[in-house]
Image: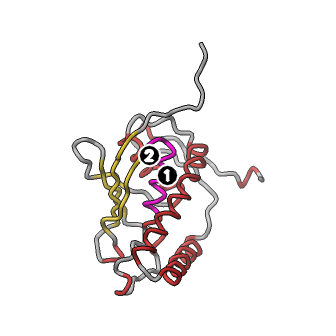
Amino acid sequence: MDPAQRPRMAPPGASQGQKPAVPQLEQINAEIFTFMYGSIIRQLITDFEDMEEVNKQLEQMGYNIGIRLIDEFLAKSKITRCTNFKETVDVIAKQAFPMFLSMSANATNWSQDGKECSLVFTDNPFTEFVELPEEYRDLKYLNLVCGVLRGALEQVSMDIEAKLTSDMLKGDDSYEIRVRLREHRDERFPYKEDD
């Protein structure tokens, strides 16, 4: 790769209260991305005809993407290990979403035990130029993102549930994905260290 085309790091500044540095990745045109995603959904609707099955397929596709995407994120972001679920969700909202989707989210509405929160965002490249017809009201258009979250966090030993609870395509004021930590497993290695 030509050095001029390599992704560059944004200037550091998280310690001064500014936005954290987010590596810039090569990105496709947002409109092409939007149309491709819409075409995938249209094909799923044609293939399955049942919105519940389409939602399951989108979530599973996202899961498969997430289990691979986490490696790229960890390699490019060079972040240190997150110590808890709250820190992990904050990194997703402030670094992963901007890196891969050119948008950021806010982690809000935390439960008292710190195991459940909402990722809320209003800008969404997935839904530009999209209107849901009435017959597709049960379609969870962003279920792919829920699956990506589940797949990525599974790779760092967090079993989560993510579900879309608010959708601007259905008249809500924002998009909201409710994320709940089911279990934070200890990392297990397939070998034992000898002293």
The answer to which of marks 2 and 1 sits earlier in the sequence is 2
Q: CA distance from mark 2 to mark 1?
A: 7 Å
* Quadrant location, the C terminus: top right
Q: Is residue 123 left or right of residue 152?
A: left
Residue underneath mark 1: 96
Query: How many neighbours does mark 1 have within 10 angstroms: few (below 14), some (14-19), or many (20 or more)?
Result: many
Query: What residue sits 45% from the left and 54% below the top?
Result: 149
**Which residue is at the far top?**
195
Tag of residue 91: 2
Label 1 is placed on what type of residue? Ala
159 or 86: nearer the viewer: 159
Q: Find out whether residue 141 is within the magenta segment.
A: no
**Residue lying at 58% horizontally and 75% vertically, measured from the top left:** 36
Q: Residue at x 39, y 76 (%)?
A: 139
Disc 2 element: helix
Q: Is residue 165 above or below residue 99?
A: below
Question: In the image, what residue occupies the spot 55% across and 79% down?
Answer: 39
Give the magenta part as a residue range.
145-158
Circle 2: residue type: Val
Q: Residues within 10 Å of mark 2 (few under 14, many from 20)?
A: some
**Predominant SS along the magenta part:** helix
